[in-house]
Image (cartoon, helix red, strand yellow):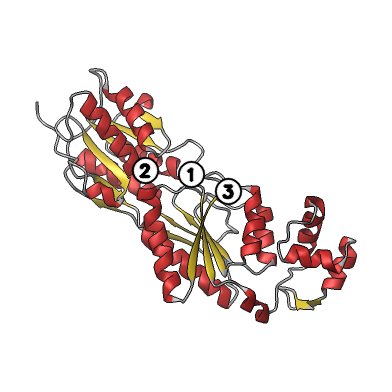
Amino acid sequence: MARTASGERVTLAQVSEQAGVSLSTISKVLNGRPDVSPATRARVEALLAEHGYLRRKASSTTATGLIELVFHELEAAWSMEIIRGVEDVASAHGLSVVLTESGSRHAPAPDWIEGVLRRRPVGVVLVFSDLPTEYRETLRSRAIPFVIIDPAGDPSPEVPSVGSANWSGGLMATRHLIELGHTRIAAITGTDDMMCSHARIDGFRSAMTSAGLEIRPDWIRFGDFHTSGGYEHGMSLLAGDDRPTAIFAGSDLQALGVMEAVRELGLRVPDDLSLVGYDDIPLAKWVSPRLTTVRQPLRRMAEEATRLVIRMTEAPLESVPRMDLATNLVVRESTARLSAA
């Protein structure tokens, strides 16, 4: 017998009767066993979620002492900041971290949910745009708290998340270029289906419009946040005589791709092109010239998300938190005042 979220008592026998399955089947679903048909599992999960079924506090002792950190891909330069932030907070609370790679940038793959139920972590930190409703309900029915680290999306208001100020980041990057005298400015952002891509471009547009500068549609490019995308768009934008004098890249990796295009075209940063990145990954201060960039506080985002998950294991939250951390501009050598020539 257990208590629902509203405080009423509900027995697994009652759930079993309503689902039309045995108590052993209910137990298998609760323990993440694979030998249950998808239709039966879905029916049982729906009933557990409907009753707001929560394990008794004592059952939390069966958890593994792990925080599970889930990525859709492990980009070494970017993901390491997230990993370090999660590990620092987890270690301070006597917890270990397990890394999982699954799914697309929008959500983990369908088989992930069964795996996490078998692993029984204390909580889950996910680096995704959102989490499907059925995943949320399953995790909540097992009293497994979760938080999204959201540098690249716009999660549902029902999902606890930690993000950053993408619009203001795009604004300050572009204003910096304008203050250096640049008027012919292009932008390369992330994929078209990610909210942060649009937010950073919206900040770019606001800065250009406020300065009364022309925004050329063909100079706004949607890439993939990777080096290859920055290189391809950089080559396209810079190959002819009618080229921008400055580019705002929506990630440091894209900025590095632009730098390679500049070198191959026989140009120089910042003499021929001023360049601003986004993220401030460690590599940004080691490339030549050192990259001017918008610092996204990735490690602190990870720390705050992990603290939030741990807090949720101790007591239910009164409201669903959304935390947006500030970004700031880090000026280095890849930007310079526009030459009068």
At x 18%, y 27%, the residue is 267
Q: Mark 1 or mark 2: name the one nearer the start of the chain.
A: 1
Q: Amino acid at mark 2?
A: Gly
Amino acid type of the residue that numbered disc 1 sits on in the rendered structure? Met
The residue nearer to you, when weighing 137 against 82, is 82
Q: Disc 3 or disc 2, which is closer to the eye?
A: 3
Residue 195 got which mark? 1
Percent from the top left, x then y, of residue 177?
Answer: 23, 39
Q: CA distance from mark 3 to mark 1?
A: 14 Å
- Is disc 3 placed on a helix, strand or loop? loop
**Drawn side of residue 225 relative to residue 72, left or right:** left
Q: Is residue 212 visible?
A: no
- Answer above or below: position of 176 versus 162: above
Q: Is residue 92 above or below residue 190?
A: below
Residue at 27%, 37% in the rendered image:
211
Picture coordinates of residue 306, whole percent (x, y): 47, 67
Does residue 18 appear left or right of residue 89 in this picture?
right
Determine whether label 1 and label 2 are within 8 Å by CB.
no
Identify residue for label 3: 107
- First in sequence: mark 3 or mark 2? 3
Q: Say which residue label 2 marks.
A: 203
Of 294 and 182, nearer the camera is 294
Give the quarter of the image for residue 263.
top left
